[in-house]
Structures are given as structure tokens and as C-alpha cells.
């Protein structure tokens, strides 16, 4: 059951770039029950402005004690969060959502873009525990080397050598993650676990559809509550109507969603 | 918070509806209550008002449906709901297990819709009251007209009263020239109480893309930003009608609740704050109990309408 913790201490702040940070928060209650792909809602301050909590996927847990969130400063909420100091407390609600479903029967491939890489580290760890004989293939994309270096290193620490693609060619393939995927031997059956910008997820979904691979995508939407009350975080579903990213997701089978293909 | 809650007299009445305290949750901000069970002792609340129900299920508006604004948020959910039949067969079953009065918010496009929903709910066990939404601004036909024309507001009220077996509260829209006129009309229509305010119609624009931030273009503003408007309207309506007034609009804390009671509200509903602090409603109940004890009041009812104008 998810927890509501008004005082969750920030124990470590890592600054990857000017605007990309990773926070480590101490919460045995959340860390011990969180599953890869789940998220937390964090309140960035105590004032009414900004009013709403911000959703962050859990990028890692350790020793059933800490969990981490990775984020880029994109607006007022994340900007305030970026100015927090170690030792300060944040109000956290979580873990929320369904999380990824690990399938050990197939080849597994993790595809992350930008901040969407965050939950994949947590997923890779769980996968290595659950399916030790079949380590996942990891493909990571971002704007440049700077954003990716630490994350690639984190995967390397797990013994996973990531394929990389950057927009400026400063690390790995100069281009898109799907172009990297096309070159890999993924076999006849491969389950893809995807999180990243919407255009990237659309492209990976199309790649998987073409090859008849299964594909789990973690959707990011704006949301007010994170627990199924505000009904703001909808994603259009194939059977008609909408799914709710907070309670039906954030992880969906890509086939069940409506993708706008340009 | 147990001991002070039991000792302080927080009881209020909305007509025939007796509540153990004046704190309810606002429709559309508390799901069907089950969602909040991990965080809130539901039986500590005065009542829960569940997400608005229509005759048929509604899928709601396309995304984006919500956007944060200064000290508030805009929503254009479009009245997404499971419809009255599924509400009765699924949601109401779990609500019956919860030891808290359940008020069902209903909405429709025609008088017959309202009449029929009220009739379907009339025999359902565990419903303490009905709140009639005549004010939701998001659906193009129906809602707005009922809430902005006194005669129509009175007619809807009378129709629901006729087919309903429980107390009927009418939720008023602030998007009118004179809210007291609508309040008087629904009082004449037989309402047992009025709740106000629903959201204020607003808009947000992204200047970079030159697009509205909601797919629906306009939406309802809620949160602390609207509290002063809500207080003013509660104050005016409480003076204009003799039925109880339920105050809604940007309430986050015990202090906010007290302000609404002073303005003339008999009870309150906590809305958007539930999204930010899922325990906001329960904390307000505990806060009121402490206040009654500290101020050595006989009951919380002593401060209702107790605004001092020097």
C-alpha cells in the first residue's frame, strides 16, 4: 500500500549537469515496497504556489532504505527542487502506479530516452535478480554525452554495457535509439521496456509492431493527485475512451494505446 | 487525534441531514472515496461527496485536461464518470462498507435526466444525500443553462426533490451575475441546502506555442486562488437564504474552514487540497476539534455566521 510521508529526508544530491539532478531520499517504507516503473508524487514546497505535487518515477532503490529520483529542471516545481539541500525534508506520496511486468521467457530490451532512463536502472536491477541467465540489452538515448555519462556508468556497474545514441553524436550513435535497435540482433521474440519522450516511444512502438515484439511503455502525463481522483492524467486507449496513467499505468502495453503517427 | 475529536461537539445539520462534523470532501476531488482509504480514516469525515454521476457513462474530454496556474489549477475533465448503473452496482457497494455519510453528486443534460438519476438512486442503501450539479461549466449543453437561469435552477431542484427520498443540496455556479438570485430560486424549488462555489471558468495560454493549455480551451479554476471569491459568495448567499449553506473554494486548512463558517457556511467541502494533501479533510476535522476545545465553545455551531463587522 502506498505511503504518505510528510517528512522524507534528502540524503544526497547529485548534479549531473547544470539542470539534471538526482536526489536520494530516505524512506524504508517506500523503498521496501517500490517496484520498477512505479512513481512518487513530491511536493516541492509548503506554499500554495506551485500548488500541485510533481510525479517522478523511482529510478532506483537501495537496501530497502533509500530511493532515488532523476529529473531535469523544466519548470517552477523542478527548479525549486533543484535548490533543495541535503538534509532537508520533502513530502512524498508513493509508491504509485503499476510498474513494469518482467518477462524472463523472452529476450529483454530496455530502451530509455532522456529522463525516461530513470526507471530503467531500477528495472535492470530487478531483471538481473529475476532472470540472472538472460541479462537485458540496454539502449539509451539523450541530447548529448554530458546527460548520459553517469547513467551509462550506473548500468556498467550492474555489468550491463549500454548502446547509446545522442542527438549531437557526442556519445555513441549520432541519431535515434530506433536506428540503434535496427542494427541489433534481438532474436525472434523480444520484450521491450520503454520510457522516454513521446516521439521516441512512438518510434519504438512502431519498431516493435513491425517485428511483432511485445512492448511496455511508461507514459508521462501531467497529473494533479497520482491516485485516481483528479482524472487529469489520461491516455487514449485503443478500445475507446481513456486509461489513467496513475492507476491503470504508468506502464501500458503499447498495443493497447492510441499512437498518433505522423 | 482521537480524544479531542470525540469530546468536541462538531455536529451540524443540513436540513434533515445530520453530520458529525462540518467537513466534507468536494465532488470530483475525492474519487469514490475508496482511493483515499490508504491515507484517511473516512469515518472521521462529516461526509464524502462522490464524483458526479450521469445517467450514461461519459468518457470525458481529451487531454490535456488539467493545468496548474498561480495558487490553483484549471480542469476540463468533462464529467468523466461510470454512469449511474455501474455506480450503483460497483462503487456504491464499496461505499456501503465505509462508515461515513455518502452524498452523491448528480448531473444531466435535461430535466428528465436529473429526475431519472434521482429515482434510480432513491432505493439504494447507504446514500445520505444528493448534491445536484447545475453548475459544471465543461459540457456544452445542459449544465450551464440550469445553473445560470433562476427558473431552470428551481425546476431542476423541484424535479430532483420530487423523485428523491434523501436531502437534496444544490451546487451553485459562481459564473453568474448574481449568485443570490440563483440561491433563492433553488430554495424556492425546495432545496434542503446549497453548496458553493463550483469552479470559476478560466483559461491558460502557452505563449510559445500560441495554443490554449487545455484541449477544451477553457476550464474550471479551483484551489486557494479562488478562496476570496468563494468567501464573498458564501457570505452573500448565507444572508439571502434561510437554508444551510455549504462553503467550497480553496479550502486547505482548519483556518480556512473557520473563515467559511464565520462567513455563514454551516459546513464546508474540501476539494483541490485533497490532491496535494490527501489527509487535508481529516486534519481539518481534528483542527476544528482543537479549536472548539481551545476557545471553550459549547459547539462549533456557535461560530457559524459569527463574522464581526465593526
Image (spheres, coloured by chain):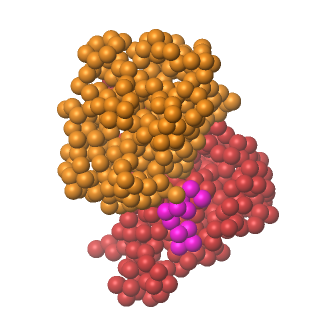
Chain colours: A orange, B red
Q: Quadrant of residue B42?
A: bottom right
Which quadrant is the C terminus of chain B positioned in?
bottom left
Classify B28 as above or below B46: above
Which residue is at the front of the view, B281 or A262? A262
The number of numbered discs placed on residues in the rendered structure image is: 0
- Left or right, B136 with respect to A172, comes to right
| Residues in magenta, as a range | B34-46
Classify B238 as above or below B144: below
Q: Residue at coordinates 20% horizontally, 52% vertically from top-left?
A: A86
- Left or right, A128 with respect to B88, comes to left
Q: Quadrant of residue B141?
A: top right
Which residue is at the front of the view, A162 or B157? A162
On the image, the x and y values in percent for residue B118 come to 74, 56
On the image, the x and y values in percent for residue A123 come to 45, 38
- For residue A126, say whether it is visible: yes
Q: Residue at coordinates 70% horizontally, 59% vertically from top-left?
A: B92
Q: Residue furthest front?
A: A133
Which residue is at the front of the view, B13 or B52? B52
Which residue is at the front of the view, B261 or A23? A23
Which quadrant is the N terminus of chain B positioned in?
bottom left
- Left or right, A136 with respect to A161, comes to right
Q: Based on the picture, tell me whether residue B41 belongs to the magenta stretch.
A: yes
- For residue B237, say whether it is visible: no
On the image, the x and y values in percent for residue A163 come to 38, 20
Classify B280 as above or below A40: below
Q: Residue at coordinates 58% horizontally, 42% vertically from top-left?
A: A248
On the image, the x and y values in percent for residue B179 come to 50, 54
Q: Based on the picture, tell me whether residue A14 belongs to the magenta stretch.
A: no
Q: Quadrant of residue A197?
A: top left
Amino acid at each position: 500500500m502506498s505511503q504518505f510521508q510528510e517528512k522524507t529526508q534528502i540524503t544526497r544530491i547529485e548534479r549531473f549537469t547544470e539542470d539534471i539532478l538526482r536526489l536520494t531520499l530516505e524512506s524504508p517504507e517506500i523503498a521496501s515496497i517500490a517496484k520498477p516503473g512505479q512513481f512518487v508524487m513530491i511536493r516541492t514546497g509548503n506554499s500554495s504556489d506551485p500548488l500541485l505535487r510533481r510525479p517522478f518515477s523511482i529510478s532506483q532503490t537501495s537496501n530497502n532504505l533509500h530511493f532515488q529520483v532523476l529529473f531535469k529542471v523544466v519548470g517552477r516545481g523542478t527548479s525549486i527542487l533543484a535548490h533543495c539541500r541535503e538534509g532537508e525534508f520533502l513530502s512524498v506520496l508513493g509508491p504509485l502506479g503499476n510498474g513494469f511486468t518482467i518477462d524472463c521467457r523472452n529476450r529483454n530490451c530496455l530502451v530509455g530516452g532522456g529522463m525516461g532512463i530513470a526507471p530503467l536502472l531500477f528495472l535492470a536491477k530487478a531483471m538481473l535478480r529475476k532472470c540472472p541467465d538472460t541479462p537485458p540489452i540496454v539502449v539509451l538515448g539523450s541530447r548529448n554525452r554530458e546527460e548520459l555519462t553517469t547513467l551509462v556508468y550506473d548500468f556498467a556497474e550492474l555489468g550491463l554495457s549500454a548502446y547509446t545514441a545522442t542527438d549531437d553524436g557526442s556519445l555513441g550513435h549520432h541519431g535515434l535509439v530506433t536506428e540503434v535497435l535496427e542494427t541489433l540482433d534481438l532474436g525472434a521474440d523480444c520484450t521491450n521496456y520503454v520510457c522516454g519522450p513521446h516521439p521516441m516511444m512512438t518510434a519504438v512502438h512502431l519498431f516493435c509492431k513491425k517485428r511483432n515484439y511485445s512492448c511496455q511503455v511508461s507514459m508521462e502525463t501531467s497529473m494533479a493527485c497520482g491516485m485516481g481522483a483528479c482524472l487529469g492524467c489520461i491516455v487514449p486507449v485503443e478500445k475507446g475512451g481513456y486509461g489513467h496513467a496513475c492507476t491503470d499505468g504508468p506502464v501500458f502495453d503499447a498495443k493497447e494505446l492510441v499512437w498518433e503517427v505522423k | 487525534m482521537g480524544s479531542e475529536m470525540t469530546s468536541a461537539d462538531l455536529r451540524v445539520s443540513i436540513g434533515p441531514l445530520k453530520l458529525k462534523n462540518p467537513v466534507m470532501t468536494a465532488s470530483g476531488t475525492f474519487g469514490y472515496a475508496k482511493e483515499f482509504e490508504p491515507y484517511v480514516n473516512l469515518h472521521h469525515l462529516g461526509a464524502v461527496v462522490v464524483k458526479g454521476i450521469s445517467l450514461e457513462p461519459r468518457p470525458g474530454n481529451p487531454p490535456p485536461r488539467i493545468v496548474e496556474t498561480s495558487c490553483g489549477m484549471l480542469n476540463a475533465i468533462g464529467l468523466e464518470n461510470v454512469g449511474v448503473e455501474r455506480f450503483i452496482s460497483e462503487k456504491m457497494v464499496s461505499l456501503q462498507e465505509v462508515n461515513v455519510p455518502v452524498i452523491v453528486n448528480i448531473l444531466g443534460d435535461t430535466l428528465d435526466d436529473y429526475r431519472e438519476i434521482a429515482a434510480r438512486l432513491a432505493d439504494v442503501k447507504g446514500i445520505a444525500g444528493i448534491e445536484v450539479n447545475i453548475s459544471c461549466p465543461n459540457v456544452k449543453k445542459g449544465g450551464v443553462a440550469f445553473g445560470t437561469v433562476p427558473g431552470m435552477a428551481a425546476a431542476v431542484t423541484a424535479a430532483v426533490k420530487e423523485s428523491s427520498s434523501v436531502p437534496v443540496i444544490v451546487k451553485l455556479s459562481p459564473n453568474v451575475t448574481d449568485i443570490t438570485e440563483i440561491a433563492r430560486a433553488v430554495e424556492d424549488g425546495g432545496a434542503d441546502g446549497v453548496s458553493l462555489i463550483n469552479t470559476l471558468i478560466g483559461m491558460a495560454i502557452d505563449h510559445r506555442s500560441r495554443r490554449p493549455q487545455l484541449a477544451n480551451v477553457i476550464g474550471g479554476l479551483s484551489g486557494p486562488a479562488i478562496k476570496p471569491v468563494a468567501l464573498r459568495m458564501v457570505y452573500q448567499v448565507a444572508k439571502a437564504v434561510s437554508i444551510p449553506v455549504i462553503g467550497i473554494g480553496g479550502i486547505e486548512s482548519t483556518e480556512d474552514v473557520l473563515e467559511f463558517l464565520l462567513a455563514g457556511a454551516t459546513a464546508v467541502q474540501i476539494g483541490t487540497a485533497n490532491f496535494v494533501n490527501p489527509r487535508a479533510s481529516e486534519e481539518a476535522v481534528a483542527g476544528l476539534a482543537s479549536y472548539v476545545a481551545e476557545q471553550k465553545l459549547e459547539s462549533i455551531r456557535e461560530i457559524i455566521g459569527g463574522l464581526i463587522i465593526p
